[in-house]
Image (cartoon, rainbow, N blue to C red):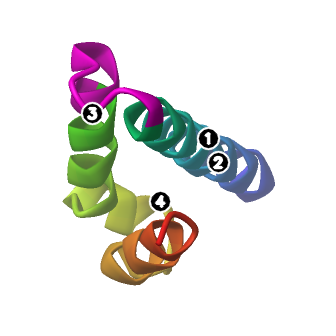
Amino acid sequence: MIRAYENLANAVIEQAVKDYRQARVKLAKDVEDVTALKIRRETERFFRSAWFGQLTSIDGEWLLEKLEGEFA
């Protein structure tokens, strides 16, 4: 049962990372893309949330720094 929970937790985090990256790509093309701005804000909030901390031992701020580095 623990294994299924870990798989689900990883899938949630992986989807948030994909969503964040897609939003950043869209914002690179159009800084006023309202949908992309919303997704970026929501994923950043998720990475900093207590729920994220329950899903993984990864530091959310560290992950955001790594993701930001992809777009620097």
The residue at which mark 2 appears reads as 14
Which residue position holds label 1? Answer: 18
Residue 20 is situated, as x and y percent measured from the top left of the image, at 47, 43
Label 2 – label 3 distance at C-alpha: 24 Å
Considering every residue shown, the one lying at the far front of the view is 29
Q: CA distance from mark 3 to mark 4?
A: 31 Å
Q: Looking at the picture, does residue 46 appear above or below residue 72?
A: above
State the mark number for residue 31: 3
What's the magenta bit mostly, secondary-structure-wise? helix
Residue 33 point in image, percent of width and height:
28, 19
Residue at image point 47% right, 59% down: 55
In this picture, which residue range is highlighted in magenta? 29-38
Q: Residue at x 64, y 48 (%)?
A: 14
> How far is the residue under mark 4 from the one under mark 2?
12 Å
Q: Indicate which disc, 1 or 4, sits on the residue closer to the N terminus.
A: 1
| Amino acid tagged 1 | Lys
Mark 2, Cα crowd under 10 Å, few <14 / some 14-19 / many 20+, is few
| Among numbered discs 4 and 2, the one appearing first in the sequence | 2
Residue drawn at point x = 33 percent, y = 59 percent? 47
- Checking the image for residue 55, the label placed there is 4
Cα separation between marks 1 and 4: 17 Å
Q: Are marks 2 and 1 in contact (CB under 8 Å)?
A: yes
User: Which amino acid type is shown beneath numbered disc 4?
Assistant: Leu
Element class at badge 3:
loop
Q: Is residue 52 left or right of residue 16?
A: left
Sequence-wise first label, 2 or 3: 2
Question: Which mark is nearer the camera, 2 or 1?
Answer: 1
Q: Nearer the viewer, residue 21 or 55?
A: 21
Q: Quadrant of residue 38?
A: top left
Disc 1/disc 3 C-alpha distance (Å): 18 Å
Q: Nearer the viewer, mark 4 or mark 2?
A: 2
